[in-house]
Image (cartoon, helix red, strand yellow):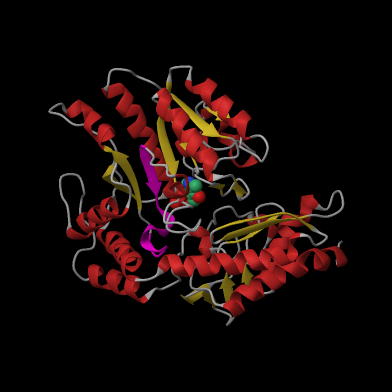
Amino acid sequence: MSGSPVWHPFTQHGLGEPIPTVVRAEGAALHTADGRRVIDAISSWWVTTHGHNHPRIVAAIRDQAERLDQIIFAGWTHEPAETVARDLVALLPPALTRVFFSDSGSTSVEVALKMALGYWLNRDEPRHRILVLEHSYHGDTIGAMSVGARGVFNQAYAPLLFDVGTIPFPAQGREQATLDALERACAAGDVAAFIVEPLVLGAGGMLIYPPQVLGQMRAICMRAGVLFIADEVMTGWGRTGTLLACEQAGVVPDILCLSKGLTGGAVPLAVTMATEPIFQAHYGQDRARMFFHSSSYTANPIACAAAAANLAIWRDEPVLDRIAALARRQAERLARVADRPGFAGARSLGTIAAIDVEGPPGYLSTLGPRLLEYFRARDLLVRPLGNTVYVMPPYCIDDADLDAVHDAIAAAPAALLNNRA
Ligand SMILES: *Cc1c(COP(=O)(O)O)cnc(C)c1O
């Protein structure tokens, strides 16, 4: 063994790729131990919303850490959790009346699935089938992988993943096929829930579909009595231009998963919100009907204090105006390269801009890692999904930094073709 004992996520250590040490961050900038300033163009994997080390969130964390660090949440409570729950219920659609805390996006999805199954069992109508959208990603725990796309990243566990019904992705021109497949699948009668990433499938390749289709999928589930789970772990907190992506379709889910930007991206926290019927199905005098889920750090007070500060920022500051301005700048930069040789499939929604880099046959297989290296060499944190390059920056990114990111993207196909090994 050489160097660090740390085993990194989604990292092939045998390739010997550099792993920079970051010592400090502010806004959209990361500072490394060797003195480089790196622009965070992907919000540290989609979590940082307002910017790194937002003063109000930092102050809330510091203040809470001095008063109450951690407390069991089964049968106990604390003010930061009560504040976050009240503020979420006030901010989000009124039908979502209940807030269950956990600590990651994957866990919020596990909780959502368990709530859905518990709802049906406690109504004495046990149902176990879950429907999912093709190319979905919902996290890396066994249940979350089960409802996500299958591939090389989960083939070792495939025999343990539970069976689901897969609805084709509503690609442009194929929307009706999606709706028909969902209609047929719901008619089977044993379907407990349909889980969806609203408007954008993130890890699946920043695949965007129209709000109208989201609304129609929700309506089909409503008519069939199938629970509708919205996984807004990535899309929530303004990413798509609105606080929730569901808003753009006038959709209110039965169950909503939020994490990533819930604390502004500062510390881990997640919530699964549910409608009153789902809570009521677990409510009563019978202990066997309670919701059997907890993790040690459920509703950690420091994380809740950060979330409360995030919610206050959303209340007090013109966050949606910042997002709209960023969305305009991104769309404008994207339009400049959309028709250039070497690019295809330019798409954007809110603060997310994505484009596919193309090249001669055989070129694509090595393109992902070479793109990663290309951006790293330019002090840009950009992490392509295969040959899809996307930008999803903190909302505070300034024009100079955003231009640096998009200038590098514009120059990437030619630069990579020219030094093709
Ligand atoms: C990131 C993500 C998750 C998983 O969240 P973690 O906090 O990484 O466990 C789940 N669903 C979606 C849509 C995500 O983007």
Task: Give coordinates of residue 117: x percent, y percent.
Answer: 35, 28
Where 151 sits versus 14, above or below? above
Indicate yes or no whether the magenta region holds residue 184: no
Q: Which residue shows up at 78% across the image and 50% down it?
A: 365
Start-end of magenta stretch: 254-267
Q: How many marks?
A: 0
Q: Nearer the viewer, residue 253 or 370?
A: 253
Q: Quadrant of the C terminus?
A: bottom right
Q: Is residue 142 visible?
A: no
State the residue in front, 421 or 215.
Answer: 215
Question: Quarter of the image holding residue 354?
Answer: bottom right
Q: Residue furthest bottom?
A: 35
Q: Position of residue 415 (x, y in %)?
A: 81, 68
- Look at the image and tell me in which quarter the N terminus lies: bottom right
| Residue projecting furthest to the left | 285
Q: Toward the viewer: 40 or 377?
A: 40
What residue do we see at 20% from left, 50% from top? 72
Which residue is located at x 24 percent, y 29 percent?
Answer: 281
Q: Is residue 405 left or right of residue 160?
A: right
Q: Is residue 43 above or below residue 220?
A: below
Residue 183 position, x and y percent, is: 52, 24
Indicate the quadrant where residue 326 lies: bottom right
Q: Nearer the viewer, residue 250 or 203?
A: 250
